[in-house]
Image: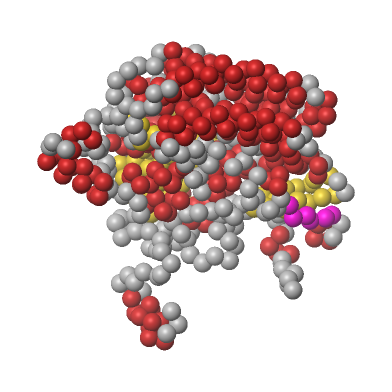
Amino acid sequence: MSEERIQTVAATLAARMGTEVVHDNGQVVVRVPRERIVEAATALRDEFGFQVAEDLTAVDYWQRREPRFDLVYHFFSYEHADVLTVRVAVAEGEEVPSITGVFPGANWYEREVYDMFGIPFAGHPDLRRIIMPYDWEGHPLRKDYPLGYEEVQFTFNFDEIESKKVKGRR
Amino acid sequence: MLEPIEVSAEELRHLVSERALKGETVLLNMGPQHPSTHGVLRLLVELDGEQVLNVVPDIGFLHTGIEKNMEAKRYWQAEVMTDRMDYLNPIGNNLAYCLAVEKLTGLEVPPRAQAIRVILAELQRISSHLVWLGTHLLDLGATSLFLYTFREREFILDIFEMVSGARMMTTYIRPGGLWRDVPDGFEETVRAFLKAFPRRLKQYEALVTKNPIYRDRTRRIGVLSKEDAMRWGVTGPMLRASGVAYDTRKARPYCGYEQYDFDIPTQESGDVYARYLVRVEEMRQSLRIIKQALDNLPGGAVRSDDRRYMPPPREEIGVSMEALIRHFKFWTEGFAPPKGSAYAAVESPRGTLAVFIESDGTPHPYRVHVRTPSFANLQALPLMAKGAMIADLVAIAGSVDIVLGDVDR
């Protein structure tokens, strides 16, 4: 793993995207604007020798931060054996351009994020739920999705749940 | 009476060809209970006669919400869930999780714990490949090898039982080291295995490698090109069978793998047979690593003594009030790593297994994501299966070495 190379790559990409490089427990993280993720991915593949989008996931900062989600991409280069982390901030309801055209391996990962977080990817060839049943409601890995079997009363849905209790449907 | 389920044509339109919608080709449902899918995987297969035109994998039947559950657990509780993901590789899952937690907290692992981690991870790799070898041949109709490979696997599971008390769900590797030191007799038992296993491996090879039926059924079947394997994120023995000499243990060393001398077996043909050859050779390389680690097994502690993230040693609790309080606080409140995120990758028997943890400075992980190798490897199944015969689909799906617990999490 060449430390200098990944620093140069990150600095170049960050300069082009108008952001800064962040270091987080050994990861080199670059923030990329949502609209320019395909451009960044293409540059990573064609100019910087990253062959695969090794991992893609999301983090939900519900009620902690706006925009609400962070997409976390991990790009990997087989030649240089280094990982670059790219983070994309996404607000609720916003569409993210799909990188499947650049890295086909991101296909199922984008479907998983769509399924679990409800972040749609524009231009994805087959954007269906992948893990949950196709008629499932809600997105389980969101922070406002309760873990338990009983729906949790938050301030925004307090009355709704209260009304159900009165009717005796629960 | 079972009612037939109606599937609208719209839903299928982009998944299958025009011919299937006209009824010229057959849509066949393979799974989720089909024995050769090794778990609960459903494949929607489009057939023209016996030829496979397309395969659409449908996963999620074994989804247990492990990532969501981990968010509600403390760091030391969440590790227990990792055993249950890839149930053929619990040690490797523990290891990936612990490496990520160690990156977050900056815990240093003593050299003895590192060496024992390597020994157990390599034993686990052998046991996982043994399950694969047995079941893969069982799929193809060779029943006898299954009995032999499971005999050897028992030996390894006995070693795990010896060190951790559990045969499969070990949770033996902990953040900062190990649960406790290995018991007396561990070294002799592993050495007995090292002595016995090479001969057994030769017996397997005598049964399989030159077996004309096996060769006919696996050579030039399910070919995956080097470029496709790389682009689709395929890792592990499948990638190496396609001619890419990539191994996380070499490229991104962890647990001191850089000090061991071993080779990365590769094959060029990228077919089912190549994957068999790679996995068998990998078992041999694992033996080499275990031998080197055993020969140079350092002494000393097996867990870090960083009191911020580790419980106090048992012997202190009886004599020190502070240690008792700390013990109580540790096992009730847990420990809180600083804010930030960490990403740690290991080489599991199936490929690159990576754990991403985001911490918000509380004792509960804010988000845990596991990049499992089977998920990405299964993605490439349609590429390999297109154009194959329906009977070969079983061999191809088996050669991926999927563990559905690993795919669905």
Query: Is B142 rendered above or below residue A66?
Result: above
Name which residue lies at 51% across and 67% down: A137
Residue A129 visible in the snapshot:
yes
Pick the front one: B288 or B269 = B288
Q: Name, please, the residue furthest toward the bottom.
A: A167
- Name the side, left or right, on which B259 lies relative to B123: left
Name which residue lies at 33% across and 43% down: B76
Query: Is A85 rendered above or below residue A92?
Result: above
Q: Name the image quarter holding residue B296.
A: top left
Pick the front one: B341 or B178 = B178
Pick the front one: A26 or B170 = B170
Name which residue lies at 83% across and 25% down: B212
Q: Name the image quarter holding residue B402.
A: top right
Q: Name the image quarter holding residue A29.
A: top left
Residue A120 on image: x %, y %: 51, 56
Residue B265 visible in the snapshot:
no
- Name the side, left or right, on which B150 lies relative to B158: right
Our reading of the magenta stretch's main secondary structure is strand
Query: Is B146 rendered above or below residue B359?
Result: above
Query: Is B294 rendered above or below residue A92?
Result: above
- Name the side, left or right, on which B94 lies relative to A78: left
Q: Quadrant of the N terminus of chain A?
A: top left
Residue B203 on image: x %, y %: 70, 21
- The magenta stretch spans residue B8: no
Residue A111 on image: x %, y %: 55, 52
Residue B55 on image: x %, y %: 72, 48
Q: Which residues are magenta?
A: B25-30
Pick the front one: A53 or A9 = A53
Colouring style:
secondary structure
Q: Quadrant of the C terminus of chain A?
A: bottom left
- Name the side, left or right, on which B405 lies relative to A12: right
Q: How many marks?
A: 0
